[in-house]
Image (cartoon, helix red, strand yellow):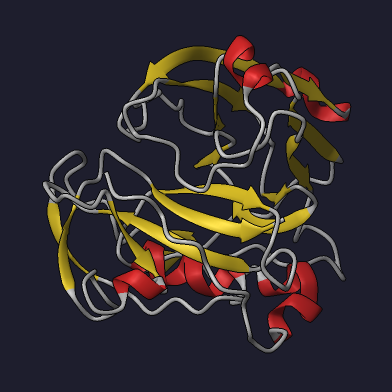
Amino acid sequence: MRSHPRRRPIRTRHPAALVAGAAALLATGCHTTSTAEATDTPFSVRFTLGARGDVQVGGPGRTAVRAAGDRAVTGGRAYPFDRPAGQVLVVLRHWRQEERAARGAVRRMPPPEEAAIESAYLVDTGGWALAELDGHPVRWLRRDTIRVDATRAGAGQRVSLTLSGPHGGRPGQVTPPLEARGCAAVEPGVNRPLVLPEVEPGAAVTDVLTRLRERCLDVQYVSMPGGVYRGTVWWVEIPVAGHAAPVATLPPTDGDRTEGPRPGDTILTDPSRPTTVVLVR
């Protein structure tokens, strides 16, 4: 597998959506239908991946969380955990505890043949919840799945995912998005053609997520130090099926601008591997 080239510092304007904060995290779906109002019961739970690879669950809402199992995965593939109706599935990808403790440097693209662990948790949020990765708003969740990849974190770096609510149930609260229904006909696990979207470094998460979900892509999130504007998108990796390069990187890196896939190109994507959205930590 080719090595991931070093990226140049980002030169981009501060997006207006970052100033707007969580209010910008609205539309993330394809075709939509109406939503139900959130309950008025306060809810907050935090998942923290510790320096030794242990997963800690805390916060007032921790009693609404139950473990759904640990599975070893390779090749960047995602384990198909069951998600009961009405619950949120949280999947944290990490190294085994002894391996995480031995790793030092941050890795931009770990070798796909190395076995990682996916730890799954089911959460009864009672309504819409806002997900924040390392303190930055990412997306809304209700009856859905969110995946976080912590395999690129350094040995001493903690990764945290927080779900909080209610939202949208009282005057003055941020309103959650409408729910996505347009991808129900997409057959899971089957390679399919995909037109690559435009992705700009420094873009708001909600803008990039909208483009990815319009293409019915499953997404996992990575938080890494670097870039310019914290909480914005640095780059995106879309899996390529049956290709020497494991992913199409958007925006293209210096080495990919002439050789690799570019926005507007059609690729055959592998849905068994989630699309990775790399955020500036």
Q: Residue at x 63, y 85 (%)?
A: 11
Where 159 sits versus 123, above or below? below
The part of the image, by quadrant, that contains residue 140 is bottom right
The answer to whether one can see residue 252 in this image is no
- Quarter holding the C terminus is bottom right
Q: Position of residue 81 (x, y in %)?
A: 40, 23
Q: Position of residue 131 (x, y in %)?
A: 68, 49
Q: Residue at x 66, y 49 (%)?
A: 128
Query: Number of callouts in the render?
Result: 0
Horizontally, residue 260 falls left or right of residue 168, namely left
Q: Position of residue 147 (x, y in %)?
A: 52, 39
The part of the image, by quadrant, that contains residue 88 is top right
Q: Position of residue 244 (x, y in %)?
A: 16, 49
- Quarter holding the N terminus is top left
Q: Nearer the viewer, residue 183 or 120?
A: 120
Where 162 sits versus 264, above or below? above
Q: Residue at x 53, y 75 (%)?
A: 207
Horizontally, residue 58 falls left or right of residue 190, namely right
Q: Residue at x 58, y 16 (%)?
A: 99
Q: Nearer the viewer, residue 112 or 172?
A: 112
Where 195 sits versus 93, above or below? below
The answer to whether one can see residue 192 in this image is yes
Q: Nearer the viewer, residue 10 or 274?
A: 10
